[in-house]
Structure formats: C-alpha cells, structure tokens
Image (cartoon, rainbow, N blue to C red):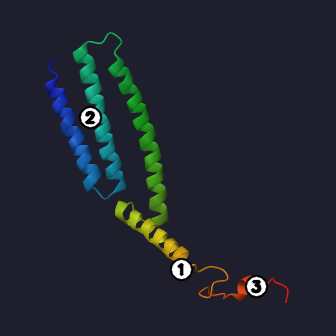
C-alpha cells in the first residue's frame, strides 16, 4: 500500500478543518471542523500503522483512544453551545466574544475610575459607607 494516498487525503481533511475553524462563525460548524481535523489524524495513524506493519497495531489502538476523546469533546462542546444558545439566543462566536469583552471593558473602567461604595461618583454617595458610623 502506498503511503502517499492516505497522507494526501489526511492533509486535505486537516486543511479543510483548519479553514473551517478560522473562517466559520457558528460554534457548531467550528466543532465539526475540529472533528475533521481529528479524523485526519486518525487516518494518518492507521495509514502509518499499516505501512510500518506494526505487530502490536499501536496506531489503530491509539486511533480508538482519539475517537473516544473526540466523542467526549463533542458531547461537552455541544452541551456548552446549547447552554450559550439558550442564554444568549445565538451560537455566533463573534457575538459571544464581543459580549464578554464588553463586560470586561465595563468592569475595567469601573475599577480604573474607582467608582464604588463611598466614591463621590457612586449613586448612593459617600454617605452610603458612613451611614453605619456613629455620629
């Protein structure tokens, strides 16, 4: 068996997966692209195992482990995507990232300005911290 044919197919699968991860906006399509990359690795493992004529078939055994890990990854990933979709109404990766960055920016601005209890810019005013102090 020639090693070139499965190796070229694995490279094409892996490149398609990388393109999907980099170009797609939907989280489910990104997960599918990661699965394509894992399948390319599995194809390489089995092809090199057959090419080397390994008596222990270590490549095929490792492929089974990669398949099990990929199944767990897809289960956890889909659970996370479904929870984000229920909470935000979208599985768009850019929207999720923009929302988290905006929340972090607001928190950083609040920390930088020092606005908090007892600060003059606090809506409750400086009396909010001194209310419990004896007069």
Q: Which numbered disc, 2 or 3, marks the residue that appears first in the sequence? A: 2
Residue 113 got which mark? 1
Give the residue pinned by disc 2.
40
Classify the position of the C terminus by image quarter: bottom right
Classify the position of the N terminus by image quarter: top left
Q: Is residue 93 visible?
A: yes
Q: Is residue 92 visible?
A: no
Total marks shown come to 3
Along the line of sight, the residue nearer the viewer: 22 or 79: 22
* Front tag of 2 and 3: 3
Q: Is residue 104 left or right of residue 11?
A: right
Picture coordinates of residue 26 (x, y %)?
Answer: 33, 57
Reply above or below: 69 against 112.
Answer: above
**Residue at x 43% of width, y 41% of height:** 73
Give the residue pinned by disc 3.
130
Residue 73 got which mark? none
Do the residues bearing badges 1 and 3 touch, measured as CB atoms within 8 Å? Answer: no
């Amino acid at each position: 068996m020639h090693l070139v044919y499965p190796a070229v197919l694995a490279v094409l699968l892996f490149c398609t997966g990388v393109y999907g991860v980099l170009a797609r906006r939907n989280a489910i399509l990104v997960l599918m692209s990661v699965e394509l990359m894992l399948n390319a690795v599995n194809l390489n493992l089995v092809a090199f195992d057959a090419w080397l004529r390994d008596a222990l078939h270590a490549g095929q055994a490792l492929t089974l482990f990669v398949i099990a890990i990929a199944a767990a990854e897809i289960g956890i990933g889909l659970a996370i995507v479904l929870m984000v979709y229920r909470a935000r109404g979208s599985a768009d990766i850019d929207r999720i990232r923009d929302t988290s960055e905006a929340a972090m920016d607001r928190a950083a601005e609040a920390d930088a300005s020092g606005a908090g209890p007892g600060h003059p810019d606090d809506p409750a005013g400086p009396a909010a911290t001194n209310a419990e102090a004896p007069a």
